[in-house]
Amino acid sequence: MELFCLGLNHRTAPVEVREKFAVGTNKLGTASMELVSLADATEGVVISTCNRTEFYLAAEDAKDALGKIETRLAQKVDVDSSVTDHFYRMEKIEAARHLCRVVSGLDSMMLGETEIFGQVKQAYGSALEAGATGGILNKLFQRAFSVGKKVRTETSIQEGSTSVGNVAVDLAEKIFGHLKNSEVMILGAGEMSRITAQSLVSRGAKSIFVTNRSFERAQELANEMGGSALRFDDWQSALARVDVVISSTGAPHAIVQRADVEKARRARKYRPLFFIDIAVPRDIDPAVGEIEEVYLYDIDTLEQLAEEARGRRQRQIEQCEQIIDLELAKLNLPGT
């Protein structure tokens, strides 16, 4: 009996491909049984999240079962067979290690995320209840859950931000204590501004104001963020009320001058104001950061902090991988 995994995720396939193979939560048990039938396998588990769909199987002949399932899956979802180029294929110990990495959050878009643990557990539970699993996959998944728990309790993989946007948001939380009810203004409607603003909203920011030289683009981003658009000539008026300013306009010179902030200080009652300047060239005059209650971080400072966080995170990844290897050595799966 051999173990193998066939899957696609956010790294190997765009969303328009992933959605073709997505399986609803309430259909995972049925899908696992269908998987066993499609591949002429003995056991099967289907995992399906927004970022991945994976098929774990135990069969007498892994290569034969893989060939069958690839062809039949493409036929089932009515797509060209070339879609299988997006699949990754793993056998034996490689498949077992991959599952452990998935459950531990090491294969996620956001490293160390915890949601995937519950999603895999639910998928396995559905397959178990449907009668699609047996001794091999039961043993594998139970070990993977044990590994995932160990990784999260013995390492700090969930801690720390590794992107410029997340580092900026972490800094904002340190300054304000929390971001609940804070107000944010975005100068420029670029991708990095959008991502950073989304992080702020996820941490509790109350409202978003978006301004851009193209008012139409400002409206688009504001609608996406559930915020309000401002005319570019009016952004100075919002300084009196916001707590955080994210700037990335692409202008050839500084947009925000010290005089703009000084003018708003009295109306703000000298409350802290946090500037995230992720533009190159810089949007905010460095002199703005000399104002007592103003905190200004540019892209170089944020990238340095993010790089330090990545270094710490890499050491945690290595520790996680060691835990996985040690635990898999105890598993002794057939065919691995």
Image: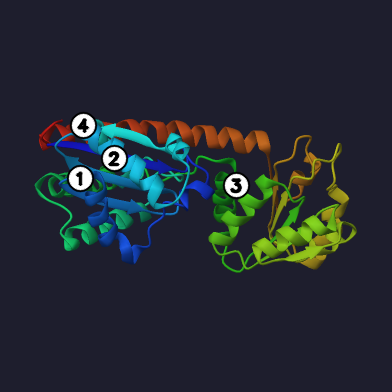
- The CA span between labels 2 and 3 is 48 Å
List the residue tagged with mark 4: 93
Question: Residue drawn 86% across and 54% down?
Answer: 260
Q: Residues within 10 Å of mark 1 (few under 14, many from 20)?
A: some
Residue corresponding to mark 3: 168
Q: Earlier in the sequence, mark 3 or mark 1?
A: 1
At label 1, the amino acid type is Asp
| Proximity of marks 1 and 2: CB atoms separated by less than 8 Å | yes
Q: Is residue 319 visible?
A: yes
Of tags 3 and 1, which is closer to the observer?
1
Q: Nearer the viewer, residue 307 or 226?
A: 226
Q: Which residue is mark 1?
A: 40
**Disc 2 versus disc 4: distance between alpha carbons?**
21 Å
Q: Is residue 110 left or right of residue 176?
A: left
- Mark carried by residue 68: 2
Which residue is more in the foreground, 124 or 241? 124
Give the total of numbered labels: 4
Question: Tag 4: residue type?
Answer: Ile
